[in-house]
Image (tube, rainbow, N blue to C red):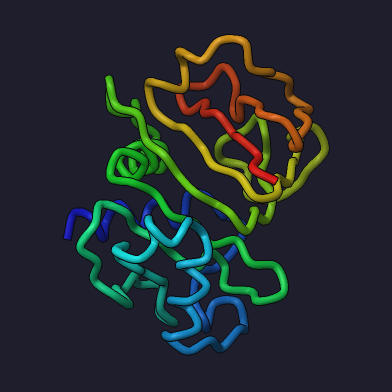
Amino acid sequence: MKSLAYATLFALAFAPSYGFAQGSTGHNMSDEELIKLSLSAAPEAIAKDATIVAMDHDGKMRTLRQGTGQWTCMPGHADPANPDPMCGDKNAMEWATAWMDHKEPPANKVGFMYMLRGDGGASNTDPYATKEEAGNNWIKTGAHVMIVGSGAKMLDGYPRDAKADPTRPYVMWPGTQYEHLMLPVR
């Protein structure tokens, strides 16, 4: 159950301006379609054993498929025209929980996330921005992976610019306790 709580917060964390269910976005995808979309976020070797979760019509997270591995995947905002599914390991889920709760991320833990279909966009400087606004340095990154947690703070030498180039590695939310490394893969 703790893993599902992490997954819920993770899902809400990385696409705050979107809903995460078939009903919340107007997209009526079947569970099979949501699972397939979720699995597309990571390489097959990661996704095949992942737990798949999605937000239901009433805003509650539900498990679509219980996995046997340490990864949790979700469909993102479940828009087939603009997909943003994601997968995170246990440490990434703990980091996302801390972020959502406005708490300090776990010390001495590094998390890894996949978003191989890209994202719907986020502020590069405000961890809590939910939409593009003047001055919040909105950025949309294509297919990427993320390193989050204490390990990301030790990766000196990566650009920390508010207006980052999303085609190259960069630090998102620089200078905050939630800064993390974004690594485009295509």
Front residue of 102 and 1: 1
Residue 81 lies, with reference to residue 88, above or below; the image says: below
Occupied quadrant, residue 24: bottom right
Above or below residue 159? Residue 112 is below
* In the image, farthest residue toward the right: 134
Residue 51, position in %: x, y?
30, 65
Query: For the N terminus, which image quadrant?
Result: bottom left
Q: Tell me the residue at 57%/16% (across/down).
A: 175
Q: Where is residue 160 shown, x and y percent of the image?
A: 67, 18
> What's the residue at 39%, 49% (across, down)?
88
Side (left or right) of 3 relative to 167 = left
Where is residue 83 drawn, in percent x and y? 63, 67
Q: On the rendered structure, is 104 left or right of 28?
A: left
Can you tell which quarter of the image residue 109 is in?
Answer: top left
Instruction: Name the one closer to the observer, 126 or 169.
Output: 169
Image mark count: 0
Residue 182 against residue 62 in the figure, above or below? above
Q: What residue is at 52 percent from the left and 83 percent from the top? A: 23
Q: Residue furthest left?
A: 1
The structure residue drawn at horizontal position 63% and vertical position 17%, both measured from the top left corner, is 158
Q: Can you tell which quarter of the image residue 149 is in?
A: top left
Residue 47, image x, y percentages: 39, 62
